[in-house]
Image (cartoon, grey):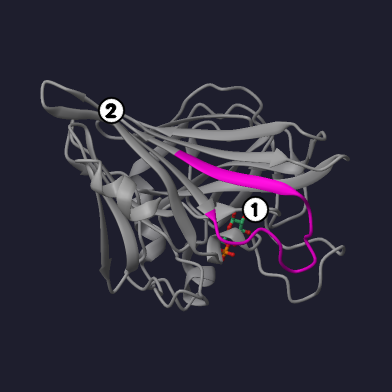
Amino acid sequence: MTIESIQETASVTLESDNQGSCLCINNKHAQVRISLFGAHVLSYINKSDGRERLWLSKEAIFDQHTPIRGGIPICWPWFGAANNKFPANSPSHGFLRTQVWNLNHAEELILNNQVQETNLVLVPNQLSAFGFEHKVRVRLLVKINDKLNLQLETTNLDDCALTVSQALHTYFLIPRISEVVIDGIAEGYSDKLSGQFVQESPQPYNIDREVDRIHRHMNGNAVFIRDKETNKPRAKVSQRGHDSLVVWNPWIEKTARMSDMSKDGYTTMLCIEAANIDGLEIKAKETHTLEQIIY
Ligand code: BG6
C-alpha cells in the first residue's frame, strides 16, 4: 500500500506542506504534483519545454475541507448543482473532490536508468455521502510519460444500472485570456448563463466575456488553446468517454465574488472540462472510463 509502493519507486515521493499531503512525481518527461485531498492534480510541468500546463489559484484554500481552486478537480457523482434526488445542502460538483484519496498502486517503467513512465492508481476513502448510496468502485488511473493521462474509472458493482454525471475539470494556465483562441470545438453549446442552446460554436473561438458553455462534443479530436500572435499551441488536450466539453471562464464580476481567486485570476486561466453531463448510465457490473490526456 501507500508508503511501501512509494518506497519501491524512484519517481514518486510523498510530501506534506501547506498544500497538505501530495504525491510528487518526477520522471524523465514530467514533474507532477497530486494532492491526496481530492486526488487533485495541482501541477503538471512537461519537461519537453519546461512549461507549467495547469493554473492554480494564488488564493486557493488548502484546509482539507474546501474544494481546491485550479488544477484538475474531479467532479463526481454529479456535475454542477446536485439534482433534486439529493439534499439541498449537497455540494457543487459532487463530493469526491473533497474526499481524502489513497495511493493504491504505483509502478514505473525504467529504461537506461531513467524512469520513462510512472503509473499510479488512487482510490477515494469514501464513496457514499449526501444520500448517494450505491455499490460502486471508483479509481483514478494516472499515467505520466511524455503526456499526462488521467482515467476516471467508475465500476457499477450493483445488480441494477447506475446513473452519474462527472467531469475532469481542468484549469489550463494561459499567458493572457485576450491572447488565445480555442481550436477544435465545432459543436454548438448549451449556454449555462442564458439557458439557451446556441447552434454554432464561435469561430474564431475568443474568450472576451464570462463563458459557461456545455458543448456537445462527442468525438475524440484534440482541442488546442492557441496563441493568437505566434499561432503556437499553449495547450493540447484530448478526451474519451465523455458526452460534452465544458468551457468556463468566470470573467470579472464572478471572479470578484469568489473568495479563492484574486481579482485578475480569470486573465490567466481557461477551463476545458471533459464531462458527462446528460446522465451517464452504467449497466450492472460494467465499468466506464472518462479519460483526458494533456500534452
Ligand atoms: C464549471 C461550471 O464547470 O465549474 C460553472 O460550469 C461553475 O457553472 C464552475 O461556476 C466552478 O464551480 P465551483 O463549484 O468549483 O465553483
Magenta span covers which residues?
Answer: 124-141
Q: Relative to the observer, which residue lies in front, 256 or 217?
A: 217
Image quadrant in which you'd find residue 217: top right
Q: Please indicate whether residue 230 sits to the left or right of residue 161 in the image.
A: left
Q: Quadrant of ligand 1?
A: bottom right
Main secondary-structure element of the magenta-colored stretch: loop
Label 2 Cα crowd, 10 Å radius (few <14 / some 14-19 / many 20+): some
Q: Amino acid at mark 2?
A: Asp
Residue that appears at 75% across and 41% down? 157
Residue that appears at 77% across and 34% down? 285
**3D distance between C-alphas at marks 1 and 2:** 27 Å
Residue 28 vs 260, above or below: the answer is above
Label 1 Cα crowd, 10 Å radius (few <14 / some 14-19 / many 20+): many
Residue 193 vs 228, above or below: the answer is below
Residue that appears at 17% across and 40% down? 50
Give the image location of residue 137, x and y in percent: 65, 46
Q: Please indicate whether residue 20 sits to the left or right of residue 196 in the image.
A: left
- Report helix, strand or loop for mark 2: loop
| Farthest residue, direction left | 113
Give the image location of residue 248, x and y in percent: 54, 52
Instruction: Identify residue for label 2.
Output: 146
Give the image location of residue 292, x and y in percent: 49, 35
Q: Relative to the observer, which residue lies in front, 131 or 44?
A: 131
Instruction: Identify residue for label 1.
Output: 76
